[in-house]
Image (spheres, grey):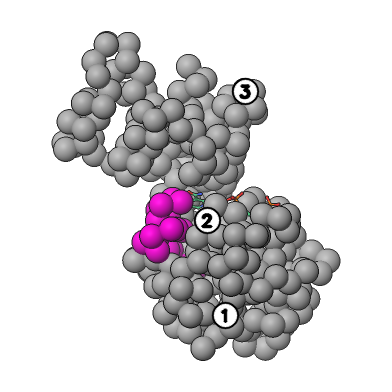
Amino acid sequence: MFKIGFIGTGVMGTAMIKNLITANYEVSVFNRTKSHAEEAINYGAHWMDSPAKVSAVSDIIITMVGFPKDVEEVYLGEDGIIAQLKPNQIILDMSTSSPSLSKQISDAAHEMGGLALDAPVTGGDIGARKGTLTIMVGGDKEAYDKTKDILHKLGSSVVYFGKSGNGQHVKLINQIMIAGTMTGLTESYLYANAAGIDPESVFKTIGQGAAQNWSMDNYIPRILNNDYTPGFFAKHFLKDLRLALDESDKLGLDLRATEQAKRLYEIMVDVKNLGNLGTQGLFKIY
Ligand code: NAP
């Protein structure tokens, strides 16, 4: 059985590590803030002092960190994974990051004789806990064939999309769709309140019709409970919208609705300083 290294014990990582340990994998972990790894260590993960040390004891290294700069640091930084990579070792970045950074890391892994995948996810904190994530994979097919059993412990839908960076591209396509569902649910909620119609009943009803979507099903109950904990950090969603718009620029596209969603999340994160709330807190800027 493969020995797994896992870097990033946040909202998503901790739940994913638990699922891997439940499936009897041996898991070694590193996280920027050691105290935030306590839950994973309590599940049975072994603590290592750096990404390089995780790499040294693992056949496969999974990363689930926050921003592209974090991905760059854990792979390419001093004491990073790549410097220690051994032939045939597999790296698997599951953070939402940039397709071009995935390609750069993949090239660096190949130089060391390793294999690389980008495998971002959708399905939220709930999907991570239940092991029902949707996982979109790009990179070395050989690595995909070797790791798909592991990925199926984390997700119920795992799809290979070809070359390095394609997993990230599909995730950004997903986020363009979510830009619509998050702004839609926010403004529907404001309208229901202003019209004085019980929002719980409204969303139960429209959730049976053409407006049904994952964001509404999962975030309206949290809003109704006054629960703005992340779930999915607003600061991470803004990062994703910026990545999607950067990539669409390169493709010669002008995605005006996504641009508008980005502006709204910029107000939430950069102006109102609410980036550590969940994405469902968007209506607080209205
Ligand atoms: P999170 O709770 O902030 O977790 C990120 C973890 O990575 C934190 O524990 C952080 O350490 C650690 N980290 C960051 N930089 C690091 C570094 N240089 N070295 C070691 N550890 C580092 O975020 P999350 O919600 O789990 O999301 C993780 C990724 O998944 C993001 O890219 C996000 O966009 C994506 N994603 C999230 C969701 C969701 O619903 N939450 C869904 C799909 C995709 P600290 O403890 O020091 O902060």
The residue positioned 60% from the left and 65% from the top of the image is 42
Q: Cα distance, mark 1 to mark 3? A: 42 Å
Residue 278 visible within the image = yes
Q: Quadrant of residue 4?
A: bottom right
Mark 3: which secondary structure?
A: loop
Magenta stretch bounds: 121-138
Tell me whether circle 2 and circle 1 mark residues in contact (CB < 8 Å).
Answer: no
Which badge, 3 or 2, comes first in the chain's sequence?
2
Q: How packed is label 2: few (under 14 Cα within 10 Å), some, or many (20 or more)?
A: many
Q: Nearer the viewer, mark 2 or mark 1?
A: 1
Compared to residue 157, the image places residue 115 above or below, namely below
Q: How many marks?
A: 3
> Identity of the amino acid at label 3?
Lys
Left or right position of 134 against 85: left
Q: Report which residue position mark 3 lands on.
A: 272
Q: Secondary structure at mark 1?
A: strand
- Is residue 141 in view from this perspective? no
- At label 2, the amino acid type is Met
| Amino acid type assigned to the residue bearing label 1 in the image | Glu
Asked whether 130 falls inside the magenta stretch, the response is yes
According to the picture, the residue beneath numbered tag 2 turns out to be 12
Report which residue position mark 1 lands on: 26
